[in-house]
Image: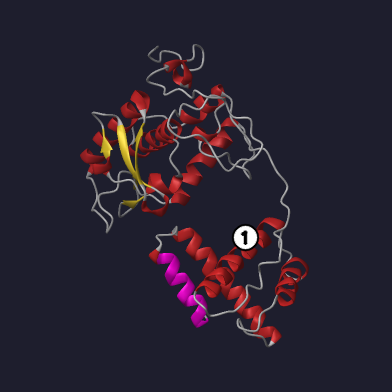
Amino acid sequence: MPRHAADFIESLRRKAVSIHTITNYERDLRHFADFLKQRGATIESTDHVLLRDFLNYLYAERRLGKSSVSRKLACLKTFFKFMLREGRLKTNPAELISSPRLPKKLPAYLAEDETATIIEMPQGTSLIALRDRAILELLYASGLRVSELVGLNEDEIDMHQETIRVLGKGNKERIVPFGSFAAKAIEAYLEAKHAAGPGKPDKDGAPAFLSVRKTPRRISARDVQRLVARAARVEGRPTGHPPHPPSQLCNAPPRAWRRPSKHPGASWPREPLYHPEVHPCQHPASKEGVRQGAPQG
């Protein structure tokens, strides 16, 4: 990777930017460096004409869609702003280039009975079934990102207060409540986990959720995605398009503390959004006919 690009990536690491963003930016800058090499150009000699040529190359030869091209252009815009700020360039060649206009799509969503079906998909008392149920209940009740859930440690779960301490994007910490339904599922899982052997802590601490294999380890984001996709197949959703975590899709999200975002045009419920402990009717478990025998509010 060119020296300028390496310095830019290091500056992102110092700002505690998401590891996924850094990985994507590294890949995008390598692609751009390869293109410059093919054209016999350098970062210092790049102008807006060459950048437009690069975008045309992505469309025509790489056959990339608008969203992929838009992401790569966003990376280059941020990179050249860095170059300008550091005095390594006199002008920003990306300043005059507009991002592709992306189509606005409404997200798929789940009705409350569909949400209940997905949450209740894991059955039985095996360690895997209890873990999967706890994960789905916690995703629904808390609205955590999958990356936040897999990074959760046991000592960050307060079962008495029914809250979790989450380290999110930009290393910002917040306290998130999760309610009694998720608490029961988490408690059942942790009891079974400790009885089977809690597993060894990793460099980040003692994982709350383990991948149960020959050597237990922290569960991965891919494991959680497979779990949601598997539950979607049980519900009858297309396997190629698994839904987002249930917490972001229910018609009546139980989150009073954080509204959904990044879905332009979506018709989300207006304020107030209720916490399931304050208004249990908002949790699908309390809907008569959806979960028979569930405790009523």
Write the start and end of the magenta stretch as one range.
2-13
Give the residue drawn at x 30%, y 44%. Answer: 208
Q: Is residue 105 magenta?
A: no
Q: Is residue 8 magenta?
A: yes
Q: Is residue 189 above or below residue 292?
A: below
Q: Is residue 5 above or below residue 149?
A: below
Q: Is residue 126 above or below residue 43?
A: above
| Residue type, mark 1 in image | Arg
Specify the quadrant that holds the C terminus: top left
Q: Position of residue 199 (x, y in %)?
A: 24, 50
Report the residue marked by disc 1: 71
Q: Position of residue 24 (x, y in %)?
A: 54, 64
Q: Give the overall secondary structure of the magenta segment.
A: helix
Nearer to me, 34 or 295 = 34
Q: Is residue 35 left or right of residue 195?
A: right
Q: Position of residue 179 (x, y in %)?
A: 35, 26
Query: For the view shown, which residue lies furthest in the bottom direction?
Result: 40
Give the residue drawn at x 57%, y 31%. Answer: 235
Q: Label 1 neighbourhood size at 10 Å, few (<14), some (14-19), many (20+)?
A: some
| Local SS, label 1 | helix
